[in-house]
Image: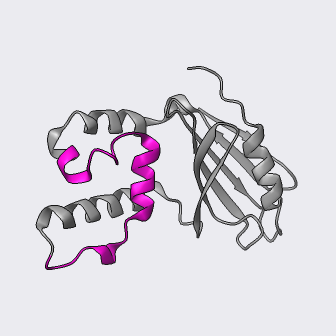
């Protein structure tokens, strides 16, 4: 389930229900597969946050023809996951406050004024939030306001 709130004019705020996150179930299934652990590494499969961090760090140019196939398989698998995971909002930065850590994709004060937050609590529960300006509209919030919003989020138990 997704909650939708409109901030001003046709700008939008989408908050996705953490219970609908199939990614965590996929990570847990991959953790039990020895082949996946040997390809991606134990650290990447430690948590949903760690897997996303590995995906963000992976770049296609890291695959080299002289590398062992398993090393290239890791890079290419992480790049493929990354292409499915990210929304192409632009730059990606680590963000954290108030017991949450995660990633911010996009910049609230640069066109197209869209931001996607992938946040994780201490139990690896994922909170996905998307904020976007309306058509032909400028910024709807600043980075400081976005940081304050993240710091104010208080996850409740599962």
Q: How is the image coloured?
A: one colour
- Which residue is located at x 27 percent, y 37 percent? 31
Query: Residue at horizontal 42%, vertical 47%?
Result: 50
Side (left or right) of 72 relative to 22 = left
Q: In the rendered structure, which segment of residues is drawn in magenta?
A: 37-66
Q: Position of residue 86 (x, y in %)?
A: 49, 59
Q: Is residue 20 left or right of residue 142?
A: left
Q: For residue 67, which quarter of the picture? A: bottom left
Q: Is residue 46 above or below residue 56?
A: above
89 and 38: which one is in front?
38
> Is residue 43 highlighted in magenta?
yes
Percent position of residue 5, x then y:
77, 42
- Residue furthest top in the image: 157
Number of numbered tags placed on the structure image = 0
Left or right of 54 in this view: 42:
left
Quick one: quadrant of the N terminus?
top right
| Residue 19 x/y as whole percent | 52, 28
Q: Is residue 122 above or below residue 60?
A: above
Residue 65 within the segment the image draws in magenta:
yes
Can you say which quadrant of the picture contains the C terminus?
A: top right
Name, please, the residue furthest toward the right. 8
Residue 91 image point, x, y percent: 58, 69
Q: Give the vertical position of 22 relative to 156 (above or below).
A: below
User: Residue 153 falls in which quadrant of the image?
Assistant: top right
Viewer-proximal residue among 100 and 33: 100
């Amino acid at each position: 389930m997704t909650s939708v709130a409109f901030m001003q004019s046709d700008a939008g705020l989408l908050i996705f229900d953490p219970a609908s996150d199939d990614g965590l179930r996929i990570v847990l299934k991959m953790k039990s597969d020895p082949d996946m652990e040997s390809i991606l590494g134990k650290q990447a499969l430690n948590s949903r946050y760690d897997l996303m961090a590995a995906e963000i760090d992976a770049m296609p140019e890291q695959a080299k023809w002289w590398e062992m196939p398993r090393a290239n398989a890791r890079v290419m698998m992480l790049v493929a996951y990354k292409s499915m995971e990210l929304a192409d909002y632009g730059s990606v930065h680590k963000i954290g406050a108030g017991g949450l850590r995660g990633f911010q994709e996009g910049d609230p004060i640069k066109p197209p004024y869209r931001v996607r937050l992938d946040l994780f609590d201490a139990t690896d529960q994922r909170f996905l939030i998307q904020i976007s300006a309306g058509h032909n509209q400028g910024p709807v919030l600043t980075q400081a306001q976005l940081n304050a919003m993240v710091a104010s989020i208080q996850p409740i138990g599962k």
